[in-house]
Image (spheres, coloured by chain):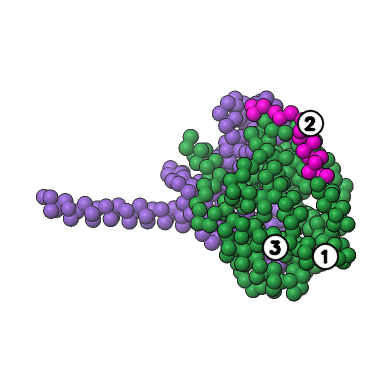
């Protein structure tokens, strides 16, 4: 019996390790595919002709829903103040944050025209995140190449979605969180102060 | 002229020290960022810097972008990078990054044939920027508070001190003695500022006009960029990415 166990246990361990490794590889490949698909979809959306600003905004909203974890982005961007906010404040913030985010993205769509993105690598960052790295290049040579990385949330029970973009070591989501937190802290920890600033920003769009 | 510029830099330092010395630091719980004890004063200087940008730098950079063809802009940008290579070589050596130091010397020597306006090296690997602020960080000198410097922007006390040392001890000074050399060196700083503003024109305007709080956003970008530069301060050392920590905390909830 002991001899059988001595033979079976290493085989089982090897099988378990290879299956874990295969799952990890599959997770990285799925994240890379998600980012590649997103880059293609963004390129198509950027180069499409839109009848008006509303159509362009609808295209941005569609990209956000298809490829990004907006719920996670929203919670992360409010930092530790999210937990203390009331349900009404959370709803207001979610609505206004989406309005400002998509409004600004729609306005800046043209800056992405003609740019290509190529995925080069993916690295696991714990169980729930994958960092997909790639190069943003400008075939016209006007802009130098830039390293752009995407943080993909990989929860076990949900589809993978992008939660952050990092350009040359600068995370857009952490920047947003620190900016939002600064506004709240400057106003005595009032979450409503951030909502007021967002309201003004949404009006100015 | 160069002496005047150095005097101006020294004066800026003294003014900064006087401004920050005159104001009291905020208690930690009243700061919007723990690293920014002089936030009230910093925000006033930031407003001044934004006004200077709107009235002078942004229009000049915009004109430069429209008037100068792309190859000219690239050449000027190359020259600005080339000028910083001696400092990179010296600071890389001080930090024990001899490979980067050698690369900087090589690029400086080869591209020196065109005064750095053309990149003659066919090397994909470029020397990474190393300044005296990074050298101080490698020597474990504390970062100090975040300060907004008139006309030069926000940075930590350590980075600002390093910047002054790099400027004063620029090895190019020895090569640019004489009237013409001094004039060239004096022009390098404003040309570099305009070139950089033009290069990052859209990104800077994005922060300036579309942020909820441009000061806080600029400060956040500064610290993340600096963290990126510092994260390779010892060859082979694995340094935890501060951004990863923030996400670990989020997903650990």
Q: At x 50% / y 53%, what residue is drawn? A: B237
Q: Chain of mark 1?
A: B
- Magenta stretch, residue numbers: B11-30
- Rendered hue of chain A is purple
* Mark 1 or 3: the one toward you: 1
Residue B13 in magenta stretch = yes
Q: Quadrant of the C terminus of chain A?
A: top right
| Label 3 SS | helix
Q: State which quadrant residue B43 falls in.
A: top right
Give the alpha-carbon distance from disc 1 to disc 2, as whole Å: 39 Å
In the displayed structure, would residue A143 be above or below residue B8?
Answer: below
Q: Chain of mark 3?
A: B
State the residue in front, A88 or A116: A116
Residue B52 lies, in percent from the top left, at 85, 45
| Label 2 SS | helix
State the residue in front, A20 or A7: A7
Q: Are marks 1 and 3 in contact (CB under 8 Å)?
A: no
Residue B68 lies, in percent from the top left, at 84, 65
Q: State which quadrant residue B173 falls in.
A: bottom right
For disc 1, the marked residue is B177
| A90 to the left or right of A154 | right
Give the overall secondary structure of the magenta segment.
Answer: helix
For disc 3, the marked residue is B86
Residue A117 in magenta stretch = no
In the displayed structure, would residue B87 be above or below residue B154?
Answer: below
Q: Chain of mark 2?
A: B
For disc 2, the marked residue is B22
Give the alpha-carbon distance from disc 1 to disc 3, as whole Å: 16 Å
């Amino acid at each position: 019996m002991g001899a059988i166990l001595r033979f079976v246990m290493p085989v089982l361990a090897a099988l378990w390790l290879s299956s874990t490794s295969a799952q990890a590889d599959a997770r990285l490949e799925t994240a890379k595919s998600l980012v590649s698909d997103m880059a293609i979809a963004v390129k198509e959306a950027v180069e499409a002709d839109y009848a008006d600003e509303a159509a362009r905004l609808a295209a941005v909203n569609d990209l956000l829903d298809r490829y990004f974890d907006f719920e996670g982005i929203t919670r992360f961007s409010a930092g530790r103040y999210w937990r203390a906010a009331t349900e009404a404040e959370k709803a207001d913030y979610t609505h206004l944050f989406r309005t400002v985010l998509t409004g600004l993205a729609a306005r800046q769509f043209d800056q992405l025209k003609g740019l290509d993105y190529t995925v080069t690598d993916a690295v696991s960052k714990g169980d729930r995140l994958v960092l997909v790295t790639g190069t943003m290049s400008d075939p016209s040579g006007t802009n130098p190449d830039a390293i752009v990385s995407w943080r993909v949330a990989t929860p076990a029970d949900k589809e993978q979605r992008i939660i952050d973009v990092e350009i040359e070591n600068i995370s857009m989501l952490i920047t947003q969180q620190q900016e939002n937190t600064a506004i709240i802290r400057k106003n005595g920890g009032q979450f409503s102060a951030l909502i007021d600033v967002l309201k003004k920003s949404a009006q100015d769009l | 002229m160069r002496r005047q510029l150095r005097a101006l830099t020294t004066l800026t330092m003294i003014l900064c020290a006087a401004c920050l010395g005159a104001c009291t630091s905020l208690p930690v719980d009243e700061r919007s960022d723990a690293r920014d004890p002089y936030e009230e004063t910093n925000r006033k200087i930031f407003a001044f810097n934004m006004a200077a940008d709107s009235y002078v730098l942004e229009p000049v950079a915009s004109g430069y972008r429209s008037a100068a063809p792309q190859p000219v802009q690239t050449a000027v940008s190359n020259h600005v990078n080339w000028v910083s290579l001696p400092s990179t070589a010296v600071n890389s050596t001080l930090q024990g990054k001899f490979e980067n130091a050698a690369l900087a010397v090589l690029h400086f020597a080869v591209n020196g044939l065109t005064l750095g306006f053309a990149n003659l090296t066919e090397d994909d690997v470029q020397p990474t920027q190393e300044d005296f602020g990074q050298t101080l960080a490698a020597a474990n000198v504390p970062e100090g508070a975040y300060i907004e410097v008139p006309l030069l922007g926000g940075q930590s006390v350590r980075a600002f001190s390093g910047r002054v040392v790099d400027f004063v001890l620029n090895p190019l000074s020895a090569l640019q003695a004489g009237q013409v050399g001094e004039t060239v060196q004096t022009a390098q700083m404003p040309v570099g500022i305009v070139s950089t503003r033009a290069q990052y024109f859209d990104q800077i305007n994005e922060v300036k006009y579309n942020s909820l709080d441009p000061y806080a956003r600029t400060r956040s970008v500064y610290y993340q960029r600096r963290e990126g530069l510092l994260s390779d301060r010892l060859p082979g050392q694995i340094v935890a990415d501060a951004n990863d920590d923030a996400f670990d905390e989020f997903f650990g909830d």
